[in-house]
């Protein structure tokens, strides 16, 4: 009887172990170097590193190691780092800055290969990647929906850690006709998807 | 009446549906307009915010510049750079926001020019400070004495904001009117539909009343018909009973008659004399058993035969061949009796027997329709 109970407990523990192995948990590569050298890096894997990170708003974008060491930051820190790391691993990424009514502007990192964006607000949910069309307007609408707010404008930008400065590119305005959007043309999207 | 009511009701409900659909379409369109208007208001506020943020960044840059001039600290210089980046960002966003608004766009272009001038001024001051060229710094600061450039920037920003606020006020009025129009549309549609529904209810009520009246009159007619059927059935039952009685009586009468006929035949057959019933033309219509017995002829050979075949009167020789002198014919014509006339009876073998003939005319009312002949055998 006792042997049978022991055997059952062992089986239960083994099953729990197998189940836990399939649950994506936080990975503890906490330096920029670890992220850049991770051979299996993907948008999903990148997001898993940040599951335990806290939200802490700060005006300037934090340096990568500063952000990773503090394990706290905001959407800018996350999106800019994702853009930097994933672009390093060969992904075509775009940084999109969405301005919503009554809230702080929100930044996400769009990954062309996945047709989805990484959002710091979704770092703790199962679906860390949010599917979206490639245009700035489509991304802005998805982001605004997730925030349950209206958006006014959205811009594509790049960030240079050396200069510690954002460079704004095309801006899409919600009230403008979609056909006048700067990225409406296919050649624009093709150009941005093959960013060096 | 029924078809008319259904057609009318269908028409009323079609109109109600059309009105309902129109109101729904109008309401949805108004909601879309409201959403678009809300977007426009958000957009205009974003423009105002960008203008305000732009001026704040200009001021922050100016403050950082003055601090840097005093301290010469790299962090203050970085703050000037940050402020310049903020100015660039807000200008880019503001210009994009006003792409479809030439007047505002033009105002931001003007602000951009002022911002560039200010950035150039800042760069010159920073360069002078980096070179510790106090004279150049003083000269440059003297050109900005009183903060004229910043005030100009502020004035232009306020002008832009007030223009946007005026447009917001106009839009607010338009929104108010649009909301009023939406309310009016919806409530008018509802009121019209309520009226039409009331009309439909009235039609249904009217139809129900008509149907009730029709049902009542139908029931009354049915009752009347039922009463008539009962009455007629009773009459038929009575007539049938009477007919049955009459039939029974007729049966009884027939039975009595047959009985009488049999009795009469029995009486006639019981008579030893020969009895023959003649028609007016002296043909035998009936005979008694004695005739059959004495003639040896069956009834079938006697009936409808002339009397002369078996009976011959013994008449004088001079009148034997004259039909006018036939005593039987005369007696029948005159309706009188003949009594005990001598005659002969011939049987089927031709044997002749002497008889005495008596004739009684047979009357139906006053008319002679035949006669009864009796033959009495004369004893030898």
Image: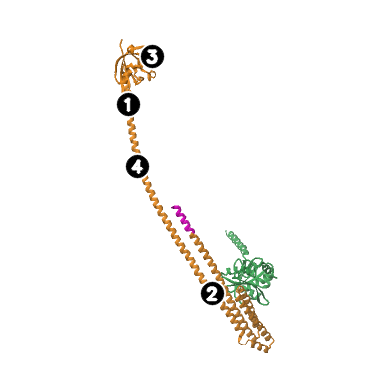
Callout 3 touching callout 2 (CB < 8 Å)? no
- Residue B17 position, x and y percent, is 49, 60
Please indicate whether residue A14 sits to the left or right of residue B320 in the image: right
Q: Position of residue A82 (x, y in %)?
A: 65, 71
Q: Are callouts 2 and 1 both on one chain?
A: yes
Identify the colour of chain B in the image: orange
Residue that label 2 marks? B170
Quarter of the picture holding the N terminus of chain A? bottom right
Chain A display color: green
Disc 2 versus disc 1: distance between alpha carbons?
126 Å
| Other-residue count near label 3 (Cα within 10 Å), few / some / many at <14 / 14–19 / ≥20 | few
Q: Is residue B211 left or right of residue B70?
A: left
Residue sitting nearer the eye, A196 or B254: B254
Q: Which residue is mark 3?
A: B348
In the image, what residue occupies the spot 52% across and 65% down? B26
Within 10 Å of disc 1 (Cα), the crowding (few <14, some 14-19, many 20+) is: few
Instruction: Say whether residue B2 is magenta.
Output: yes
| Sequence order check, earlier mark of 4 and 2 | 2
- Host chain of mark 1: B
Q: Which residue is mark 4?
A: B231
* Kind of element beneath mark 3: loop
Secondary structure of residue under mark 4:
helix
Q: Which is more foreground, mark 3 or mark 4?
A: 3
Both marks 1 and 3 on one chain:
yes
Q: Work out whether disc 3 and disc 2 sit on a shared chain.
A: yes
Query: Residue under circle 1?
Result: B257
In depth, the one of B373 and B225 nearer the eye is: B373
């Amino acid at each position: 009887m006792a042997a049978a109970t022991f055997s059952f407990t062992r089986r239960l523990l083994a099953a729990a172990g197998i189940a836990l192995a399939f649950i994506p948990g936080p990975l503890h590569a906490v330096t920029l170097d670890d992220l850049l050298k991770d051979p299996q890096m993907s948008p999903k894997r990148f997001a898993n590193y940040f599951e335990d990170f806290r939200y802490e708003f700060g005006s300037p974008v934090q340096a990568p190691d500063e952000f990773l060491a503090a394990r706290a930051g905001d959407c800018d820190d996350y999106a800019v780092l994702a853009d930097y790391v994933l672009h390093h691993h060969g992904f075509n990424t775009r940084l999109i800055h969405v301005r919503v009514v009554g809230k702080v502007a929100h930044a996400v990192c769009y990954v062309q290969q996945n047709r989805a964006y990484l959002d710091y607000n979704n770092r703790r949910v199962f679906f860390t990647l949010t599917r979206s069309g490639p245009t700035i307007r489509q991304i802005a609408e998805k982001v605004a929906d997730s925030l349950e707010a209206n958006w006014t404008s959205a811009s594509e930008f790049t960030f240079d850690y050396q200069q510690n400065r954002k460079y704004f590119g095309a801006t899409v305005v919600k009230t403008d006709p979609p056909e006048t959007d700067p990225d409406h043309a296919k050649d624009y999207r093709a150009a941005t998807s093959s960013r060096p | 009446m029924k078809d008319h009511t259904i057609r009318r009701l269908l028409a009323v409900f079609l109109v109600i549906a059309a009105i309902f659909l129109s109101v729904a379409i109008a309401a949805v369109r108004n909601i879309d307009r409201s959403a678009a208007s809300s977007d426009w208001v958000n957009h205009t506020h974003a423009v105002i915010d960008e203008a305000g943020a732009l001026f704040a960044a200009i001021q922050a840059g100016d403050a950082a510049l003055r601090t840097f001039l005093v301290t010469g600290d790299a962090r203050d210089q970085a703050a000037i750079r940050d402020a310049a980046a903020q100015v660039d960002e807000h200008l880019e966003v503001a210009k994009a926001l006003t792409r479809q608004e030439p007047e505002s766009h033009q105002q931001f272009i003007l602000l951009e020019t002022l911002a560039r001038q200010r950035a150039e001024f800042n760069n010159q001051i920073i360069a002078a400070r980096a070179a510790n060229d106090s004279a150049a710094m003083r000269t440059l600061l003297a050109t900005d004495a009183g903060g004229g450039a910043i005030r100009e920037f502020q004035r232009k920003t306020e002008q832009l904001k007030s223009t946007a606020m005026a447009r917001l006020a106009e839009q607010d009025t338009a929104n108010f009117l649009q909301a009023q129009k939406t309310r009016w549309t919806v409530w008018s549609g509802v009121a019209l539909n309520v009226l039409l529904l009331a009309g439909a209810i009235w039609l249904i009520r009217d139809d129900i009343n008509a149907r009730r009246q029709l049902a009542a009159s139908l029931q009354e007619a049915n009752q009347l018909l039922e009463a008539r059927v009962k009455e007629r059935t009773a009459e038929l039952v009575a007539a049938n009973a009477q007919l049955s009685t009459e039939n029974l009586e007729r049966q009884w009468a027939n039975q009595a008659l047959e009985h009488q006929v049999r009795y009469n035949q029995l009486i006639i057959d019981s008579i030893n004399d020969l009895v023959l019933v003649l028609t007016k033309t002296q043909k035998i219509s009936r005979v008694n058993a004695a005739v059959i017995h004495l003639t040896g002829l069956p009834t079938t050979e006697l009936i409808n035969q002339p009397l002369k075949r078996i009976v011959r009167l013994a008449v004088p020789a001079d009148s034997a061949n004259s039909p006018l002198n036939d005593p039987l014919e005369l007696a029948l014509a005159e309706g009188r009796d003949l009594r005990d006339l001598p005659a002969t009876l011939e049987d089927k073998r031709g044997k002749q027997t002497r008889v005495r003939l008596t004739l009684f005319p047979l009357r139906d009312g006053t008319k002679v329709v035949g006669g009864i002949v009796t033959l009495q055998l004369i004893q030898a």
